[in-house]
Image (cartoon, helix red, strand yellow):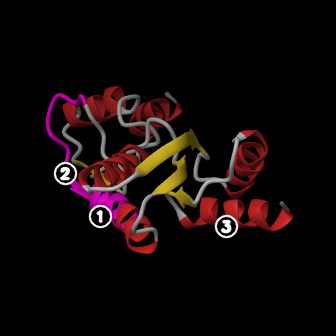
Amino acid sequence: VNQTADIENTIARERIDAALIAPNDIYALAPGVNFAQAQGIPIVTVDRHVHNTVREVPHVGIDNVAGGRLLAQWVVDNFPRGAKILHLTGQPGSSTGIDRAKGVRDGLAEVKGNYQIIAEMSGNWSRAEAQMLTEGQLTVLPSPPDAIVADNDDMAMGALEAIRLA
């Protein structure tokens, strides 16, 4: 909602030739993008997609589903007999977070073996949140996970700190 208001306010105050935007939420920014496109302003998204726009929006970024599959493959390669996994996902509503989590889930589902996500929660791309969530899960799970998959490096560092403290 804030990004949409920012787009509308900026267009009202300034002449905009084009805009590069990294959406916080794949759906919430659609009204702002639609408004800009209606004004004839080209929009390109960077890192994260935007959905439900009147016209398709060009996007520049990596294949985050493939990135999630690589995370899953690491687990399979390092735990060939299976693993119980704690999965720390990114910001809800973020296409990056949605896609990486999908890649992890799909990658684990496609392999033969005993791979189970025993807990999955959003660390919001935050080291501190990931540390807090991991600390909590390490105390409530009946046994520790075999692997913790964090969908970004900052959350991985938070999970590592939680393990170190435990």
Q: Residue at x 39, y 52 (%)?
A: 114
Q: Report how many numbered discs are placed on residues in the image.
A: 3
- Label 3 Cα neighbours within 10 Å, binned few <14 / some 14-19 / many ≥20: some
Q: Is residue 138 visible?
A: yes
Dot 3 or dot 1: first in sequence order is 1
In the rendered view, would you say 43 is above or below 74?
Answer: above
In the depicted structure, whether residue 134 falls above or below residue 152: above
| Residue position for label 1 | 62
Q: Nearer the viewer, mark 3 or mark 2?
A: 3
Q: Which residue is mark 3?
A: 157
Measured as percent of width and height from the top left, residue 35 is found at 29, 29
Name the kind of residue labelled 2 in the image.
Pro
Outermost residue, bottom side: 78
Q: Is residue 21 visible?
A: no
Which region shows up in magenta? 52-71
Q: Hey, which residue is sitting farthest left in the picture? A: 55
Residue 85, percent from left and from top: 53, 52
Could you tell me if the residues under marks 3 and 2 are in contact, i.e. CB atoms within 8 Å?
A: no
